[in-house]
Amino acid sequence: MRQVVEGVWRVTFALPLGIDHVHCYFLRGSEGAWTLVDTGLGVADAEQRWTPVLAKLGGRIERIVITHFHPDHVGGAADVAAITGAPVFQGRDDYAQCVRAWADDRQQRLLSEFMRAHGVPERELVRIDHESAALRDQVRFASDPHLLDPGDRIDGWEIHRLRGHADGHICLLRDGVLVAGDAILGDITPTVGLYPRCRPDPLADYLGSLQTLIELAPRVAVAGHGSVIVSPVERARAILAHHGERLERTAAALSEQPRSAYEVSLELFEAHLPPAQRRFAVAEALAHLERLADDGKAARLERNGRIAYVRR
C-alpha cells in the first residue's frame, strides 16, 4: 500500500482474470477517517486479507464507495462492510444492474442465449458458462446500499456518472483528482461491451463520457488498473481516437455477406483467447457493430434466433 496522490492511498490485489490486478483506494477524510473506493473480488479469507491492510491506516473506515458492479470492484463489498462496520455507497443505476447481474438466477441463461445468438460456438459457450459460474461465487455485493446520483457529494468528493464501461459507472472528483474506477485507464483501454439487459448503445455512452471527462479536465486520475494517469484529458482524447480506429476496422470487417459479432471479433482481437477474454471480445465487437448500425453504416439482420451484420 502506498500514497499515489496527496491524501489518496492505493492497495493492489492480484486477480485470476485476464488482467492480473485491481487497485482499491483509501481517501483521507477531513477528520482522519477514510473512504474506501472499491473492494476487489470476494475471497474466502476476507478478514485475513483486509485486517493487515486496515491496520496500516491509523483510522477507521467511514464509508465504502463502489464505482461499478464488475466483480473485481464490487465482489468484496459485503465482506469489507462486515469487517469495518462501514456503510456501502453505490450509484443508483449501477446497483440496479448489479442486482440483475449477480442476484437474478436468469442472468447466466440470458448471457448464454445472447452469446449463442451472436454466433459463439457451443464449445466456447461451455467454457464461458463454466468460468462465469465460478466468478459468481466471488461476488458478495452489499444489499441495499446508500444510493448515489450525479452531483451528490461525499466528504467533498463530487459524484460523476461516466457510462460506457458499465451502465451506471460513477467516479469521484475533488480538487482536480479523479478517482476513475475503470472509466479511464492509462495502460490499456477499458472494455466497452454490449450485454443482455444493458443500455442499447454502450459505445455512444462511453464516447460521451470521454467528452465529459475532457470538460471536467482533472489534473490527475487514479484508476482501477495500471498506472496513475498524469494527463487524463490527453488520455481521454487518445481513447476517443482508438475507438474511431476500431469503428473503421469493424466496418472493414463487414461485407454484403452476413457476419456475426463472434466472426467479427476474430478479426478485431486474437483468435485464441481464454473464455472471459472471448466474451469481452464478442461484447466489444458487438458494441462497435451496433454503433455502426445506429450511424447507418451497417445493417442488423435477425433470422431463426441468430443475429448478423452486413455493410451498408
Image: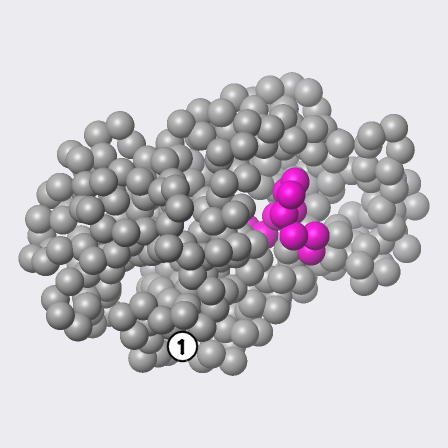
Q: Point out the image quarter for the C terminus.
A: bottom right
Q: Residue at 58% across / 32% down in the picture?
A: 107
Residue 274, percent across and down? 52, 30
Q: Which residue is mark 1?
A: 218
As rendered, which of 218 and 26 lies closer to the eye? 26
Q: Residue at 78% across / 48% down in the picture?
A: 253
As rendered, which of 246 and 27 lies closer to the eye? 27
Q: Is residue 91 above or below residue 151?
A: above
**Residue 302 visible in the shown view:** yes
Amino acid on which the number 1 mark rests in the picture: Pro
Under tag 1, what secondary structure? loop
Q: Is residue 198 in the magenta section?
A: yes
Q: Quadrant of residue 152?
A: bottom left
Q: Main secondary structure of the magenta part?
A: loop
Q: Quadrant of residue 175?
A: bottom left
Residue 93, percent across and down? 52, 55
As rendered, which of 158 and 23 lies closer to the eye? 158
How many badges with numbers are in the image? 1
Q: Quadrant of residue 13?
A: top left
Q: Which residues are magenta?
A: 189-201
Q: Is residue 15 above or below residue 149?
A: above
